[in-house]
Image: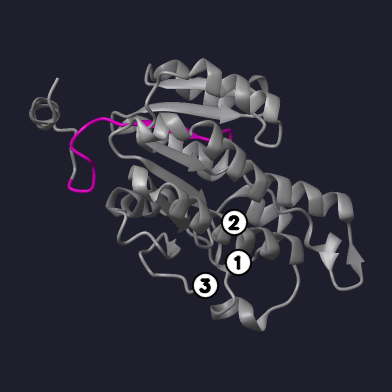
């Protein structure tokens, strides 16, 4: 089936918008049970893409399972991004399946009180770094061949302005572990992008802004104005669609603004 045929068929059913690629993609999303991850699954599936939605505990992800039951394009899989055996098992299951877009969304923040001056928790530090940095590396490497075999060849990670050395966070202290993890994530993504550039793989960093999620409200205790998670994800997807090898070198916020390193 040619791309031209797919484009014509999609237009005929009124499913294509200006920001959507002209052929259906296969998207793997980590941390899909709630918040941004759930929205990525919902919105990609709604536009006709095939979605592999992963979560640590599928049996507890009621909303995700209900969504999958209504949409045959969604497959729900078990995955803890800090468990190498689980990563390898899932990669083996999908060994021959091209994956156009890998969304490394699974993330951890932890209580700010346990990562502040005078109060640090080593176990929490390991958990945050394992999830936000190691997990991205391990999942990306496990699915490298699937991504190279695809049409779009995109590896995406969810970063944060908290990982930037400039901007609003240069005047704020605290959340040391989360900040360190996002700065490390940015650097790791740059390194992997260099290593796979010859294979045409695009590495992109997107940030959700102050999205209305359980993590921001409950773990961080954010009290300011928040962007609905659906709007945040829609903005990030628009940026992901536009990424190329040439324009994806810097982190970009959901609203299209570039985030300085």
Q: Is residue 229 visible?
A: no
Q: Describe residue 186's horizontal placement relative to residue 120 as left or right.
A: left
| Helix, strand or loop for disc 3 | loop
Q: How is the image coloured?
A: one colour
Dot placed on the residue nearer the N-terminal end, 2 or 1: 1
Residue at the disc numbered 1: 163
What residue would you read off at disc 2?
185
Q: Position of residue 10 (x, y in %)?
A: 15, 29
Q: In the image, is 198 to the left or to the right of 171? A: left
Residue depicted at 30% across the width and 48% down the height: 241
Mark 2 against mark 1, which lies toward the viewer? 2
Disc 3 and disc 1 in contact, CB within 8 angstroms: no
Report the magenta residues as a range.
18-33
Q: Which residue in the protein does label 3 denote? A: 261
Q: CA distance from mark 3 to mark 2?
A: 12 Å
Q: For the view shown, which residue lies furthest in the bottom direction?
A: 171
């Amino acid at each position: 089936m040619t791309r031209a045929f797919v484009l014509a068929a999609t237009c005929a059913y009124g499913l294509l918008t200006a920001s959507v690629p002209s052929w259906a993609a296969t998207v793997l999303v980590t941390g899909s049970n709630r918040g941004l991850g759930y929205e990525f699954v919902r919105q990609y599936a709604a536009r006709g893409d095939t979605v592999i939605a992963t979560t640590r505990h599928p049996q507890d992800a009621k909303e995700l399972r209900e969504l999958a039951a209504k949409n045959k394009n969604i497959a729900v899989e078990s995955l803890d991004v800090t468990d190498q055996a689980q990563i390898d098992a899932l990669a083996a299951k999908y060994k021959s399946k091209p994956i156009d877009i890998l969304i490394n969304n699974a993330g951890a923040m932890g209580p700010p009180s346990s990562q502040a001056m005078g109060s640090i928790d080593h176990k929490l530090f390991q958990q945050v770094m394992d999830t936000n940095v190691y997990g991205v590396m391990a999942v990306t490497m496990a699915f490298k061949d699937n991504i190279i075999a695809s049409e779009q060849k995109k590896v995406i990670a969810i970063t944060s302005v908290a990982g930037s050395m400039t901007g609003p966070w240069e005047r704020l202290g605290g959340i040391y572990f989360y900040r360190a993890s996002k700065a490390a994530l940015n650097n790791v993504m740059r390194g992997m992008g260099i290593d796979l550039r010859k294979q045409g793989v695009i590495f992109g960093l997107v940030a959700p802004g102050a999205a209305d999620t359980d993590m921001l409200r409950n773990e961080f205790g954010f009290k300011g104005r928040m962007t609905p998670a659906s709007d945040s994800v829609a903005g990030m997807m628009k940026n992901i669609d536009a990424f190329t090898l040439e324009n994806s070198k810097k982190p970009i916020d959901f609203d299209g603004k570039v985030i300085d390193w």
